[in-house]
Structure formats: C-alpha cells, structure tokens
Image (cartoon, coloured by chain):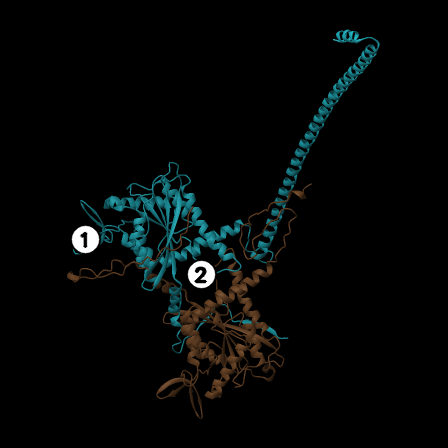
Amino acid sequence: MSEAVAPDAMVSPAVGVPYGEKAGGPVLDFSYVGIDAILEQMRRKAMKQGFELNIMVVGQSGLGKSTLMNTLFKSKVSRKSVLATAQEKIPKTIEIKSISHDIEEKGVRMKLTVIDTPGFGDQINNENCWQPIMKFINDQYEAYLQEEININRKKRIPDSRVHCCIYFIPPTGHCLRPLDVEFMRRLSKVVNIVPVIAKADTLTLEERDFFKKKIREELRANGIDVYPQKEFDEDAEDRMINEKIREMIPFAVVGSDQEYQVNGRRLLGRKTKWGTIEVENIAHCEFAYLRDLLIRTHMQNIKDITSSIHYEMYRVRRLNENNTVVAHTPPAPLQLTSTGCNSFAMTLPPLQPSTPSISQVG
Amino acid sequence: KVECREVQTGEGARAVPLAGHVGFDSMPDQLVNKSVNHGFCFNILCVGETGLGKSTLMDTLFNTKFEGEPTQHNQPGVTLKSNTYELQESNVRLKLTVVNTVGFGDQINKEDSYKSIVEFIDAQFEAYLQEELKIKRTLHSYHDTRIHACLYFIAPTGHSLKSLDLVTMKKLDSKVNIIPIVAKSDAISKSELAKFKIKITSELVSNGVQIYQFPTDDESVAEINSTMNSHLPFAVVGSTEEVKIGNKMVKARQYPWGTVQVENENHCDFVKLREMLIRVNMEDLREQTHTRHYELYRRCKLEEMGFKDTDPDSKPFSLQETYEAKRNEFMGELQKKEEEMRQMFVQRVKEKEAELKEAEKELHEKFDRLKKLHQDEKKKLEDKKKSLDDELNMFKQKKTAAELLQNQAQQAGGSTTLKRDKERKK
C-alpha cells in the first residue's frame, strides 16, 4: 500500500535574490513560498479563540492573597474576604471559591479564573487540609478527561484545569513550617506550584536572602519540585533561563492596589511612615519578576506542562486503576502470548501458539 | 477533619476592566514561539490520473525538486506513495508530506480505484486514534500523518467531469478537505475554461459533493476567501523550468506560439492556489481536518465498536467500563477459539495414533507370517535331513553287513572267492 518514508535531506527553497532592477519596479521574490505565513494564521486563530488561565491561590488568611491577585491583573479579580463577627472568624470548613473574569488587552481576550481557598491552614488542627484542594484539582482533571473520552466531543473542550498554584509562605524569616512542607510536597506532584514569600516588606534584604536560601534548601531536602521543574527543561536555552529563575524562587512579593505619588509619578505601593514601597520596583520587592514569569514569559509553558504532563499523569493513573490486569492462564499445551497492558488498542492481540508437545496427548 | 465547600459564581464570567498594562497580550507570541520551536507538519494528497502533472505542480508550489521519475502507466491497481520532506523558510520548519496516487485511472476496470485512497486516509485517522486512546501517550511529539488537503486533479477535457472523478470525490468529501483543480489548463482556451468551470461546479453541486470552502468568518480574510471560493476549481499550470521574459527569469512553459507564465494571474490560477493553500488557509485546513473529519471518523469508529456516550436512565458509561466489557467478551471468544483449536489438535493426534497402531499391527502380522513360513521351511528341511540320515544309516548297515560276509567268505575260501565276491559286489 503506502509507505511513509523518513524525512529526506533538508530541502530548502533558496532565499530570493532580487532580479533585474533596471526598470526600477518592485522586486518580486520569486522563490518565496509563503510557509511562514502560517505564523500569522496561528496568531489570528489564537486572537479569535482567546485564552484561558486558571490560577489557584493558597495560603493562610491575612497573607494578602487577594491583594496580590488584584495587583497582578490590575483589576478587582479577587474580593478580599473580610470576616466581621467572631463566629465567622474561624471558618469550620475550607471553601474553594472559583471566580472567572473576562479580561482584554490589546485585542487579546483572556478568561481568567482565580480559585481562592479561604480557610486553608486556619484551623487548630490542620491535618489533611490539603485534601479538599487536591480533590478539587483532580476533579478538574476528571471533568476534562470525561469530556475528552466522549464520543460526541465539543469542538473546544473548556479547560478548567488548574494551571498554576501560588503558595503563600508567611514571612517568618526562619524556615518552612511543617504545614508548608506537607502541602507543597503533595501538591507539587499534581500541579505547578509557585511559592512566594508574602508580605515581604517585613523582611530586610539580608533576612530575605537568608530566608530564601533556607527555603530552597528545605525544598531540595524534601524533594519538592516547584515550577519551573528541572526535569521539564526542554533544551539548553530553556535550562539557562530557568536556572536563573530557580535561583530566585521563592519570590518575595508585596501586593497593593493603591496608587501613590512617587517622584512625580503615580505608582502602586504601600505608604508607611518610613517610606513608600513601590510594588513594581525590583529594588524593593520581587513582584515584577513574579508577574513576568507568570504572565509575560511563561504562561504558555505553564499551561503546556499542566496539559501534557500533570494531566497525562492523572489520565494514566485513572485509566490504569480501572484496568485490572486479568491473568490469563490458558490450559496446556497451547500458550498464548498477550500484548502488554499499556496498549488501550481496540484491536485484538495476535494469536501466537507455541509448538505443542506430543507426549501430553492421549 | 475539614469539609470542603465549592462555591462557583455562575456560568458567565464578568468582564473586568484593567487599570494598567498587565502583559498577557504577549500570549499569542508565546504560543507562536512554542509552535515555531516545535515545527509544523502539513500533509497533502494528490489524486489524479497519471500524467496530469501532480509531481510538477508540487515542485512548483514549494519551489523545490521533490522526487524521482514519472510513473509508468501499467500499474495493476492504485497504490499510494508518500514522501516526507523537511522545508524551512526563515524560522519556520515545515514537515511536508506529499502523497501521490500511483496508477489512478490506468486500469480498465476502475470500480475499486477509490478504495485504496479511502483506506489510506482512514489508516492515518486510525493511527492518530490509536495514539489518542493509549494509556501512556505522547500526543505532543506525535508526527501527524492525517491528510490536511486533497488536491483533486481534473483532466482538461473541457467538457465535464468523468464519472471516475465524481465517484471518487463523493467518497472522499466526508473524509478530507477536497480542493479541485483543473490540471494542465494551458490546454484549454479562456472561454472554454469558463464554461468548463461552470459545468464542473454545477456537476459537483448536483451530485452533492462537498468540496472545501475557504473560511469566511474571520473578517481579515473573509473577503479574499469568498472571492477565491468563486474561482474554484483553480485552473493551474505547473513548471519548474525558467524562461527569460523581458529582463526577468520566470517559471513558464514555452511553446512555439507563446509562453505560459505560471505566476501570471492572467494565464492561470497558480498564484491563487498557492495563496489559498499555503499563505492564507494552511492552519484552517489543519484545523478542519482535526475538528471535523477526524472527529467524524472517531465518532463512527467508536460507535461501531459499541461504545456509547450516555444511557438516559443510568449513569454515563465510562469508556473504560465499556472497554472492560468488550475485553472480557473478546477474551471469552479467544478462550473459545483456543478450546476449539485444542480439541481439533487432540482429535488429529488421536487419528494419527490409530493409524500408527494399525500399521504396527500389520507389521506384527507380517512378522508372524514370515516366522511361520520360516518354521515350515525349517521343518521341511529337517524332515529331509532325517530321511537322508536314515538312508545313510541303512547304507552303512548294509556296508558293514557286506564287509562282514566278505571277511567270513575270505576266511572260509581262498582269494578266488574273494575275487568272485568282489565281482559279485561290483
């Protein structure tokens, strides 16, 4: 029938050299095929479809999660949970609040979903407080999987999978708490975790550096792989960029949605008696790095890792748990070999009888 | 123990204005960069009779010399030959696969010509489906071989479509994006060409053949696409030879009466084809293949295998459960077949054994017979020997008796009686 041949030698159309300019007319590039127009086509398609991003924020109350989200996206995407009465002060449950917004910038439309987890780590006994969060994340994977295995599938499966989980570390200045370690250890296996030091304006630069070093050591010691994970670096260039980022995490951030006048410009900041902290000034805090990482440079990468690695791992696990291997012991003398259970194929494995022994007959 | 309460704020997301520059307008760039690093692939299928200039047109479209010699006309059936090439233009790497139908239209009986084409297209869908259904899959790095565009070459008769063309296109229109083109269109005059195009379009419509329509929903390309839609089928001329016209070298075909320039829009629709196929709609062709044709194939294939989406009264079936049920069914059948084979084997061995036993018995009998024969012979010989011995004994007795008498006679008479005895004896 047909044979697919391995790619032949690189055949490259020569770049056009302008001909006969004597007439002074337009120079036509005759050997230009136009393959690179596909980039423009892709861009158009992406602009039309829009993008989706789902961020989860996890941390104890009062660490400034909502404020940081509002600062990141320069709009009120997250409502601060203000607990009024004493009864409401200690919530008995962890809620998972998922709010979606449509935002647009320069023609690019994005559906941003911020998933808040008020109540996390607020109880006296915080055992298993990561469970509802893990369940939520796995539920999103499950929903996507169910859609994917439908016979009649939607043209574009709505993506509610959590792409990124920002974990807020309280600025104690010493080391990670057991709760932090436990949580990050478990969740780094199912979702991209970006740890940040919250309210970093309470740390001096030396304290901050010491704290960060301590945190990095502890993460390494516990085998916690936070984003950008080392094993998913694609090539040397990637690794170089990501190494620089890895040396800086966790980012020490300060959030603010209030503007102040600094040096004649209106900037986001926090005004105190001893000075004004500019949020977007990298000399003051590392908010700008976080923003660049999450939004301007690595957003696509975060989504890719979620869909092609975390989701696939979930899928493998899920499909394997239903797939109990039936040990097929055929009666002697015929021996049938079956293909390994990695294959979900719809076709029958081929029959391969081995040579039987005559002595057993009769 | 902590409980969890999930709170979702309704279906519709509310639009929120931004107070400053956030920076996610770089998303399309990030996406494009990722695709550039990954590379693209595009697969074209050329269907048409031998000698209509398919290979030449591919060479002309992509500005390279792709492959070998033209095929012979004596193929017994239609086979599909596919070749993959890596092209690069500026920073875009394209893995282009060109599939050619070899021997199409050459046979005397062409009833089955379309079958190998349909089988090939289905095989590519099947390969993708298999990969998608795997437990451990690598869709990210999978080399997509599904056909994105099918260029159907129509012979420039100037009259109408051949029935082979209609039948083949009808079979292919739900499986692949068909772009019909009139090949070697320099054989038709301009007025004949206009009539030919109208005839072809009306025949396609009246036979319900769905050819690919360039998309008109995106404003930036809607206008050009709808204009091009009205020019289908494109009348093309292909050539890799260059001819000097004025002070430029252009791709053309030179005749004694003039030169047909490939890239001159007054001469043929080559530029339109290139524009539509590559520069404007390549991505849309790929998307249509994936979201329409592949999904249709997948749906049909899965339904055929007995998978269902949801049962109205019970919970939705999971693909896994249905698979398990099917698997058990198959295993059961397998076991049954295995049992049958075993039975047959045992039967055969028994028969053979019986045969061998028969043969053994026969041999024994033969042996017995021979033995008996041998014994009889032996007995006969012994009898003979015995009688011979008896005779010998009698002879000996007679001899001794005679000698005794002789001795007596010798003792009584003289030598003369001895002589007489001797004479008597003689």
In this rendered view, identify the residue nearer to me: B282 or B425. Answer: B425
Chain the render paints brown: A
Residue B228 in picture, x, y percent from top left: 30, 54
> Residue pushed farthest left?
A22
In this rendered view, identify the residue nearer to me: B59 or B162. Answer: B59
Residue A176 in picture, x, y percent from top left: 55, 81
Residue A162 in picture, x, y percent from top left: 50, 70
Callout 1 crowding tier (Cα within 10 Å): few <14, some 14–19, many ≥20: few
From this view, report whether residue B217 is shown above or below residue B18. above
Callout 2 crowding tier (Cα within 10 Å): few <14, some 14–19, many ≥20: few
**What residue is pinned by disc 2?**
B141
Q: Quadrant of residue B414?
A: top right
Q: Which amino acid does the dot numbered 2 rest on?
A: Ser
Q: Which amino acid does the dot numbered 1 rest on?
A: Lys
Total residue callouts: 2
Chain the render paints cyan: B
**What residue is pinned by disc 1?**
B244
